[in-house]
Amino acid sequence: MGNLLVTWLVTSISLLIISQIDFFGIKVKDFGTALLVAVVLGILNALLRPILSFVSFPLIILTLGLFSFVINAAIFWLAAALVPGFQLRGGCLSALIGPIVLGLINSLLMGILR
């Protein structure tokens, strides 16, 4: 349970860091919104990602795994559509680059915490 809370907080902080870097076009209103986005991303990744990966398995194989970036972008965009206060102002590019940068910052922060 403690590990889940740490991951939740680190993801929220990572979202706030990305939001402060205006280059990516990702805006998070405040820390409460970042917490909500982290929960929504977790739920979407747990429920929707396996279904999308199963349905698009031939495309994932055909593109040597690159189609997984499209699935990440779709989930990130859906989270932005569901959570008020979380905006992707760069359109598809923000949805494509956002999860990559989020993962990098999450890894960096989790490495520092361990």
Image (tube, helix red, strand yellow):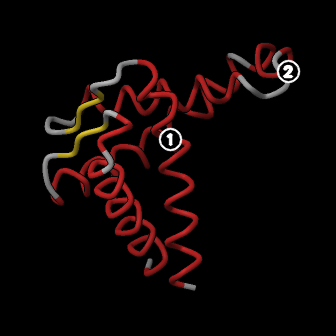
How many C-alpha atoms fall within 10 Å of the one at disc 2: few (<14), some, or many (≥20)?
few
Residue lying farthest to the bottom in this orientation: 114
Categorize mark 1 by other alpha carbons within 10 Å: few (<14), some (14-19), many (20+).
some
Q: Is residue 103 left or right of residue 79?
A: right
Q: Residue at x 27, y 25 (%)?
A: 89
Q: Is residue 90 above or below residue 14?
A: above
Percent of width and height locating residue 37: 29, 47
Above or below 56: residue 65: below
Nearer the N terminus, badge 1 or badge 2?
2
Q: Specify the label residue 61 is tagged with.
A: 2
Q: Quadrant of residue 32?
A: bottom left
Q: Residue at x 85, y 25 (%)?
A: 64
Which disc is residue 81 wearing? none
Q: Quadrant of the N terminus?
A: bottom left
Name the image quarter holding residue 72: top right
Image coordinates for residue 90, horizontal then vertical, percent = 34, 23
Count of all numbered marks drawn on residues in the image: 2
107 with respect to 32 (left or right): right
- Which quadrant, please, contains the C terminus? bottom right
Instruction: Identify the mark at residue 99; answer none if there is no mark.
Output: 1
Q: Nearer the viewer, residue 22 or 10?
A: 22
Q: Is residue 29 shown left or right of residue 38?
A: left
